[in-house]
């Protein structure tokens, strides 16, 4: 029996116009879903499913935290997540997700919300996710400062670097490339 069977909602056999579903999304959930971004977390998800004429509204609230890799030091970091969203689902001939509606085939009539919950959480991850200042792995930051010119100078004073660049001879291959550009 799949661990994700509990995330399947039988739409045709809903007992009332409104129904509440509560899910605990833990490490087992994220490992079973096997998404690319999130491998660990501890969240609570509340789904209020409202049956309307020919459609279903899913009011989804998710709150908790996930563990993701810091972009700067590569250590795991805790990222709080709190989001609300509304998803509209209807029964139709074939599966379709046009952005406004999710259509599932009538013969299926069971909607698996596991991947939907994963995507809602993944959308809350900022493009750049780093530890709070001073919380990164110090040995990794030290190694980065050694090998990266932009991290090595925290004040952003590039005048010393520019002076060093001016003293270096220019690679003659660049001159040949400049000739090509000048002729065009």
Image (cartoon, rainbow, N blue to C red):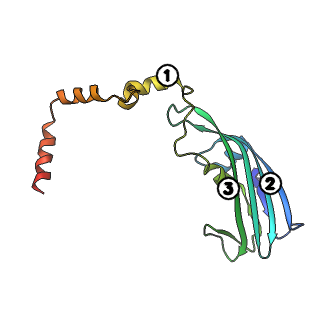
Vertical arrangement, residue 66 with respect to residue 123, above or below:
above
Secondary structure of the residue carrying tag 1 is helix
User: Do tag 1 and tag 3 residues touch (Cβ < 8 Å)?
Assistant: no
How far across and down, in percent of the image, does residue 171 sit? 16, 36
Which residue matches tag 2? 6
User: Do tag 3 and tag 2 residues touch (Cβ < 8 Å)?
Assistant: no
Residue 147, image quadrant: top left
Which residue matches tag 3? 115
Q: Residue at x 31, y 30 (%)?
A: 158
- Is tag 1's residue or tag 3's residue first in the polypeptide sequence? 3
Between 80 and 142, the one nearer to me in the picture: 80
Between 93 and 44, the one nearer to me in the picture: 44
Q: Residue at x 89, y 67 (%)?
A: 16
How far across and down, in percent of the image, does residue 124 sit? 62, 48
> Label 3 neighbourhood size at 10 Å, few (<14), some (14-19), many (20+)?
some
How far across and down, in percent of the image, does residue 15 sit? 90, 66
Residue 69 placement, left or right of 112: left
Between 39 and 160, the one nearer to me in the picture: 160
Residue 150 placement, left or right of 110: left
> Label 2 neighbourhood size at 10 Å, few (<14), some (14-19), many (20+)?
few
Q: CA distance from mark 1 to mark 2?
A: 43 Å
Q: Which mark is residue 139?
A: 1
């Amino acid at each position: 029996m799949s661990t994700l069977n509990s995330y399947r909602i039988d739409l045709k056999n809903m007992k009332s116009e409104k129904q509440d579903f509560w899910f605990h999304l833990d490490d087992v959930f994220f490992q079973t879903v096997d998404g690319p971004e999130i491998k660990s977390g501890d969240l609570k998800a509340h789904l209020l499913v409202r049956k309307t004429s020919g459609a279903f509204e899913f009011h989804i609230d998710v709150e908790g935290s996930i563990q993701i890799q810091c972009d700067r030091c590569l250590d795991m970091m805790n990222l709080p997540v709190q989001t609300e969203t509304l998803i509209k689902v209807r029964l139709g001939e074939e599966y379709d997700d046009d952005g406004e509606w999710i259509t599932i085939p009538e013969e299926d009539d069971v909607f698996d919300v596991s991947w939907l919950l994963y995507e809602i959480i993944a959308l809350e991850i900022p493009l750049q996710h780093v530890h709070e200042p001073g919380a990164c792995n110090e040995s990794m930051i030290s190694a980065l400062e050694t090998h990266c010119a932009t991290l090595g100078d925290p004040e952003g004073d590039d005048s010393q670097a520019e002076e060093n660049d001016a003293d270096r001879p220019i690679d003659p291959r660049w001159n040949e490339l400049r000739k090509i550009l000048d002729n065009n």
